[in-house]
Image (cartoon, helix red, strand yellow):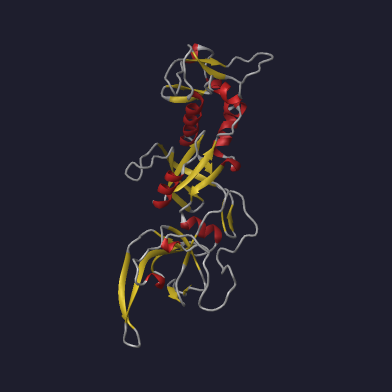
Amino acid sequence: MSKRALRKLTVPFGMRDERPVFVSDVALGLDCRCTCPECGEPLIARNRDFPERRRVRHFQHARATSCPGGFETAVHRMAKEVLATADAVLLPWWASGDVVIEPEALAIVSARLEVPLVDGAARPDVLLRGMAEEIEFDVLCVEVRVHHAVDAPKRDLLVTNGLDTMEIDLSGLTDEAVADPVAFRYEVLENPANRHWVHLARASFVAQRADQALIEVEDLTVSERVIITKAGRAFTIREQWAFLVKPGSRDRVCIQIPDETVGEDAQPYPRGMHTISGRSITVDQWGRLRLRYKMYLDQIQMNPRELQAPQRSLFEAADGSEGPGFNVRVRDWKGHPGL
């Protein structure tokens, strides 16, 4: 019988007074007064220590029952309980281009479970508010993976709505790690190897850690204004409001939609963080954007979990070409990634 099949017969955590508990914290047998988090049936605490014990301490249903989801549900419930009662949690590693942000602790100010967001379309396992040094995360969604990872539709929903979301992967935990309260809390709160960003939208956090200026797009509204050229011809400029985010500041600015969209339906820059190319726009001493040649922004894309060499610079031209024209790595303003 496989290890996975064996796990289906046991429940690592029980429910008592509507909260998950470790088997080491309750009385032996039926005196534990616990129920299964999946089916609600009474549990027996198998937590007696004796020589030659082969299986880790665990709960077992008091009577024969079919409850294949007991293990997954129990781990999921306990992980959420640990997060909801913790003082801090480790944020994941993040990278894009040549910028790498190492894992760091988020001091938790408040935590809520299963809060509906986006008119109920999203319901993260845990919703945190906290501080990473001086940067506030007022909405940080945490998803706990025991069996199923965040799927593509949910990821797209989180990205579209600009929700900071991290996933903690507990699918590879051993029985020993699950049964040990210290080891389990470490896996949920502190292990840098089992967590990653599903979406990082906090431009102030990235700008501060990278010590660079970014453009943060939230409003997808495109407006038009007409200017008269020196030759007397009317020229339509399409613009979009965004924020210029620098370490320690966030100022509202107006960005110009690239003129390739003239004559077409103007496609706004998508929500999220964008790099500023020195070849396309400049920032003056008052923090205002100045157009040079054509304006393009490169949307920041997160790398896979491991860096891939060679890394191209995030804040410099990728091809080293000269002149007013240049290539962007990702041209998402028309909705199509490209080089």
Residue at horizontal 48%, vertical 31%?
76
The quadrant in which residue 47 appears is top right
**On screen, 65 above or below 231?**
above
Q: Position of residue 334 (x, y in %)?
A: 41, 63
**On screen, 103 above or below 44?**
below
The quadrant of the rendering that contains the N terminus is top right
Q: Position of residue 227 (x, y in %)?
A: 32, 80
Looking at the rendered structure, the number of numbered marks drawn on it comes to 0
Q: Is residue 338 left or right of residue 100?
A: left
Q: Is residue 94 left or right of residue 220?
A: right
Residue at horizontal 60%, vertical 62%?
312
Q: Position of residue 96 (x, y in %)?
A: 56, 57
The quadrant in which residue 315 appears is bottom right
Residue at horizontal 49%, vertical 55%?
205
Q: Position of residue 70 (x, y in %)?
A: 48, 23
Q: Residue furthest front?
A: 263
Residue at horizontal 65%, vertical 59%?
310
**On screen, 191 above or below 216?**
above
Q: Residue furthest right?
A: 52
Depth order, front residue of 24/313 = 313
Depth order, front residue of 1/208 = 1
Depth order, front residue of 233/279 = 233
Depth order, front residue of 312/117 = 312
